[in-house]
């Protein structure tokens, strides 16, 4: 997603700039837990020496983990600020990752380059008319696309529900609230081009403190990526006052984690 780009199907077309969230995103937004990577490894994703591309990498959480597991990792994002955070974190961890500023719709790589392409919590933002052909172009024969999600669950968790209501007070256009938790076995967009070769879905509690949950909520597209700085501060102050009535200093938040492992259907192409 390009900085200040708008999407008719997201948040009533309100401009979104993930670069404005980069610091909170890096510090407070957790990536999927260890169990997620263990399940992917069992499905031959993220293995040592695989050529792997993480698309819309943000601050590089998945890219770093796959590099730690021995994969040869490239990662792209259209936010230069997010990529800068990702490079700093990789350097801090002594990891070699090829980070580039680029969109999913026009990936700067040669044909048949990658064994694996991952896209976590981001597929919703892509123009699939261009992204799907690019994925098929740069995957090796029998390569895999992994589209995954890591969502908190407002219908199971009163802390999430109350925090989301506060987000809507400041940004009524935010369309990410009240997720129902329903997960399709295979997404419709994939059926004509890809075959499903793996799938999992499960729930896990993720630990937070009041401070880290505040940071996690600031990093939403509906807050720091969309609102003026003074409104972000006002939201955060009100959220800080709200949380002691909802939770202790430390608490867990239920998340639903799921992933589709897909291969281009050569018969369809």
Image (cartoon, grey):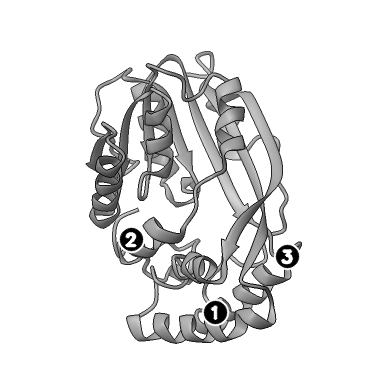
197, above or below 151, in the image: above
17, above or below 257, in the image: below
Give the side of residue 268 with respect to residue 99, left or right.
right
Q: Secondary structure at mark 3?
A: loop
Q: Position of residue 16 (x, y in %)?
A: 37, 65
Query: Which of the labelled discs sits on residue 191, or is there none?
Result: none
Q: Secondary structure at mark 1?
A: loop
Marked residue nearer the N-terminal end (1 or 2): 2
Can the viewer see residue 152? yes
Give the side of residue 173 with respect to residue 247, left or right.
left
Give the side of residue 242 with respect to residue 123, left or right.
right
Can the viewer see residue 184? no
Q: Position of residue 104 (x, y in %)?
A: 35, 41
Q: CA distance from mark 1 to mark 2?
A: 23 Å
Marked residue nearer the N-terminal end (1 or 3): 3
Residue in the image at 48% along x and 28% along y: 145
Near-viewer residue (170 or 246): 246
Q: Tell me whether the residue at label 1 lies in contact with that at label 3, contact meaning CB atoms closer than 8 angstroms.
A: no
Near-viewer residue (94 or 112): 94
**Residue that label 2 marks:** 22
Query: Which of the labelled discs sits on residue 172, or is there none?
Result: 1
Q: CA distance from mark 1 to mark 3?
A: 21 Å
**Residue that label 3 marks:** 157
Near-viewer residue (95 or 10): 95
Q: Residue furthest front?
A: 249
């Amino acid at each position: 997603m390009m900085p200040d780009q708008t999407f008719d199907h997201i948040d009533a077309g309100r401009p979104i700039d993930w670069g404005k969230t980069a610091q909170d995103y890096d510090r407070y937004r957790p990536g999927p837990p260890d169990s997620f990577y263990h399940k992917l490894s069992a499905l031959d994703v993220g293995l040592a020496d695989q050529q792997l591309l993480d698309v819309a990498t943000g601050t590089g959480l998945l890219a770093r983990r796959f590099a730690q597991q021995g994969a040869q990792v490239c990662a792209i994002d259209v936010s230069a600020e997010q990529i800068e955070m990702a490079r700093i974190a990789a350097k801090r961890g002594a990891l070699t990752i090829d980070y580039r500023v680029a969109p999913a719709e026009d990936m700067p790589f040669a044909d048949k380059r990658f064994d694996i392409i991952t896209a976590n919590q981001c597929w919703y933002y892509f123009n699939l008319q261009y992204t799907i052909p690019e994925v098929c172009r740069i995957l090796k024969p029998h390569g895999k696309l992994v589209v995954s999600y890591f969502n908190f669950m407002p219908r199971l968790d009163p802390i999430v529900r109350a925090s989301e209501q506060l987000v809507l007070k400041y940004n009524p256009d935010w369309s990410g609230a009240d997720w129902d938790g329903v997960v399709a076995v295979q997404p419709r967009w994939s059926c004509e081009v890809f075959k499903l070769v793996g799938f999992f879905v499960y729930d896990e509690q993720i630990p937070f403190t009041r401070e880290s949950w505040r940071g996690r909520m600031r990093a939403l597209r509906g807050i720091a990526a969309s609102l003026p700085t003074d409104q972000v501060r006002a939201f955060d102050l009100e959220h800080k006052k709200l949380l002691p009535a909802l939770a202790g200093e430390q608490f867990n938040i239920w998340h639903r984690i799921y992933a589709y492992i897909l291969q281009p259907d050569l018969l369809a192409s």
